[in-house]
Image: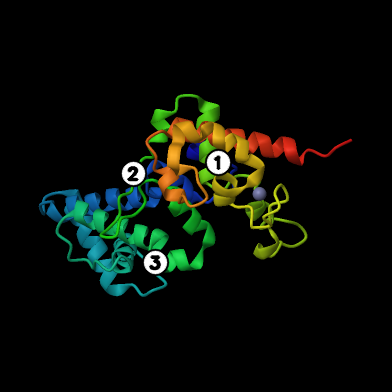
Amino acid sequence: MFLKGILGVDKTTSTFVVLGEFGRYPLEYFWWQQTLKYCDRLRESTPDRLLYCAYQTQLEMLSVLNDNQQCWLWNMQLWLDDQGIGVLYTNVMCVVASAHASYLESTYGEQARTRSNKLRTYQLMNTSCTTKSGYSYAHQSYLQAITNVQLKQSLSRFKCSNHHLKVECGRHAKPESVPKRNRVCRLCPLRTIEDEDHLLLVCLAHHDIRCKFGQKLGKQLTPCSLMPKLMHSANQKAITLYLVSCLDNKSVLVKPTR
Ligand SMILES: [Zn+2]
């Protein structure tokens, strides 16, 4: 919740997306890291120490308990098995690095992208999400580069799909969600889905704004541009100002006339 507050997004925003903005992992990975370190201390303790007795007791419990009677060591082994590591690890930080890699694969890997359109969109906009050979998972540079909080939060909300474009509103429409093919832009005659790409790169309603910012953002602002290229631009502040201008223009255009 604290990180969501910094980004200014709704509390229902996907946690993995929020963590992705900060290049962080779920807290449970830190808990397991501490647990593994503690287990190492127990293992390395000498027979004259209480820690040694505690570890021996855990080992004894492990040998007699069944699946319904779990002990602390049993839970740790279960977690290690889930990570595909097993109990014969030698270095805690290697285990944690491996667990982090599993998290990234399950969250951003090929299979995850196939399952979720939202994830695919986020990945296109996250400037450090993946590389072909592995993952580069890092704190997003705009969080430091843009000092104006309102401006920064506007970009955060957009990247986290916390916006009012049809592609997202239609998903949450009541009493039932609008089929994706019907979530089209009403502001221009193109009749295509109003998503992040459409707003920034295609929508004719924002053509004048696109021309105005074209000098700063250059070739990145054409219908043939790709969202990753735009979001990876070094000039994050100019992109955010452009985004806010488009969103403001959209608000004015959709205002009901009296
Ligand atoms: Zn449009």
N-terminal-most mark, 2 or 3: 3
Q: Identify the image quadrant of the C terminus.
A: top right
Measure the C-alpha gap from mark 1 to mark 3.
Answer: 25 Å
SS assignment at label 1: helix
**Residue on which the image places disc 3:** 110
Q: Disc 2, disc 3: CB below 8 Å?
A: no
Can residue 16 be spotted in the picture?
no
Q: Disc 1, disc 2: CB below 8 Å?
A: no
Q: Residue at x 12, y 53 (%)?
A: 44
Asked where in the image residue 242 lies, by quadrant, the reply is top right
- Hey, what amino acid is under mark 3? Glu
Judge from the rendering whether residue 111 lies leftward or rightward of residue 73; answer left or right.
right
Asked where in the image residue 144 lies, by quadrant, the reply is top left
**Residue on which the image places disc 2:** 138
Nearer to the camera, 216 or 55: 216
**Residue on which the image places disc 1:** 157
